[in-house]
Amino acid sequence: VITIQADLPPEINVAAKIEEVRAWIEENADSFDPRVSLDFKGQDEDQQESMQFLIKAFLVALFIMAIILVTQFNSFYSAFLILTAVIMSTIGVFIGLMVIGQPFGVIMSGTGVIALAGIIVNNNIVLIDTFDYLHRQKGMPVRDAILMTGFQRLRPVMLTTITTVCGLLPMVTQTNIDFITREVTVGAPSTQWWVQLATAIVFGLTFSTILTLVVTPSALMLRYTFGEKVRWLKQKLSFGKN
């Protein structure tokens, strides 16, 4: 057994460098003895274990939320529509990281995505619950109920997003405010640990909120429009048989 160890400067992405080494090993595989096996340990091994754990935790969280949503709304479509916001928020996280040029940290960014899932579903729950109340209990037409839902719940949804984003901006910008000494420092060591988590929540929440206000009402209208088309087709088929 031969162990090769190496350290990298803080500004170098370890994961990207490991991928370069693996690519080099694949290109030069013929030069290695077939009896020799290569394994990556240390930080890469810990990172892979953390990634597998976070993926399982994310799937379990989605499963538990799906059960609760189906039980409360008594509709698989509503539960599916709410959980799609989680997927949209994940897309927003990766877009935000690419915009600011920050790597995806498995532990902190992954934890931020999981925490983001619990925040994101609230916006869709508010919209769909209000729509069901206006349409089923108040008897409003579908289109009017959707428009009234957007009108009534726009401010609560935007307030939730804005307050959360503003509260996390100091972490995203690595700004440390000391109220005792009245000093403001940027890039303090105490803020670097939480940058990736805060960045994931801020960009994911902003991106998914904008899409939720458009996609969720459209999806609600699509369900009833599709239902009307199906009923119309059944009537045509039954009329043709008669």
Image (spheres, rainbow, N blue to C red):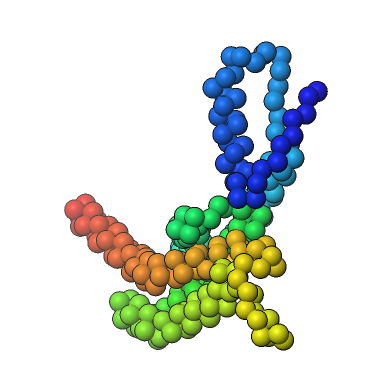
Q: Position of residue 135 (x, y in %)?
A: 39, 80
Q: Position of residue 240 (x, y in %)?
A: 19, 53
Q: Quadrant of residue 134?
A: bottom left
Q: Position of residue 49 (x, y in %)?
A: 71, 44
Q: Residue at x 71, y 18 (%)?
A: 36
Q: Residue at x 65, y 63 (%)?
A: 192
Q: Quadrant of residue 217?
A: bottom left
Q: Residue at x 71, y 29 (%)?
A: 39
- Residue 62 vs residue 193, the one in the foreground: 193
> Does 169 sit left or right of 140 as displayed?
right
Q: Position of residue 51 (x, y in %)?
A: 65, 48
- Whether residue 134 is situated above or below residue 111 in the rendered picture: below
Quadrant (top left/top right/bottom left/bottom right) for the N terminus? top right
Q: Residue at x 55, y 64 (%)?
A: 199
For residue 229, say whether it is visible: yes
Most distant residue in the right direction: 1
- Residue 128 vs residue 225, the one in the foreground: 128
> Does 164 sit left or right of 135 as displayed?
right
